[in-house]
Amino acid sequence: MSFARSIEPFASRYGISCECVVGLTATRRYHLVDRSLQDGDTTLSAGGNRMGKVVIAAFSPKAGKEEELKQVIADRLPLLRQLGLATDRVNITMRAANGTILDVSEWVDDKAIERAHETPEVLELWQRFDACSEYVKLESLDDIRQEFATFDAVN
């Protein structure tokens, strides 16, 4: 197995771009250089990785539509990633005590959120959400009023 292949799980876990370059320094230590960042990019973490915008979306499934909603949620990130709108960060899907399903994921940046509102594939996806759920404001969930909000894992 090549070194590049052996670090793929590490790179994925820490959000390093697939376009990263692996190099060997003079001290024989490997280092990663993220080539995906643009000059002037100010949304960097302490480790130098691009940071996105984390979103918590909450959906109340319509009667008899929970499985359909879970499928739409499962289809959402692959589409957004294909369109370059979402990061590779693993999402978390969970259920509130009242049955509301929450999904935590990461947009690439504010511009990606804006582009989503103009992208036909995303607008079609949102129609699918509308057909099987109602959007819910987090403030309406009793769970979040707890000191440590806790939800049941869905994925």
Image (spheres, grey):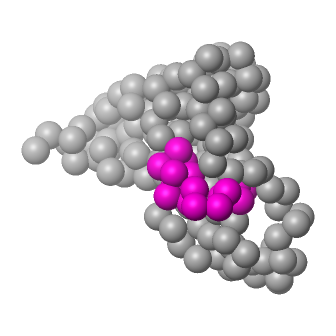
Residue 154 place in picture, x, y as percent: 51, 68
Asked if one can make out residue 91 in the rendered structure from this viewpoint, the answer is: no
In the rendered image, the residue lying farthest to the left is 1
Observer-nearest residue: 10 or 94? 94
Q: Residue at x 61, y 26 (%)?
A: 124
Give above or below for 132 relative to 64.
above
What quarter of the picture does the N terminus occupy? Answer: top left
Where does the image place residue 65, in percent across and percent down from the top left? Answer: 57, 56
**Residue occupying image coordinates x 49% and y 58%:** 67
Choose between 61 and 93: the one closer to the eye: 61
Q: Which residues are magenta?
A: 58-73
- Snapshot quadrant of residue 121: top right
Number of marks drawn:
0
In the rendered image, is residue 137 in sight? yes
Instruction: Indicate the quadrant where residue 2 lies.
Output: top left
Residue 148, horizontal then vertical, whole percent: 76, 81
Residue sitting at the far front: 64
Using residue 43 as the reference point, say whether residue 106 is left or right of it: left
Q: Is 76 inside the magenta-drawn segment?
A: no
Residue 143 at x, y percent in the picture: 78, 77
Q: Is residue 63 magenta?
A: yes
Residue visible at 56% across and 52% down? 69
Horizontally, residue 47 falls left or right of residue 18, namely: right
Q: In the image, is residue 131 above or below residue 117?
A: below
Question: Would residue 138 be found to the left or right of residue 68 on screen?
Answer: right
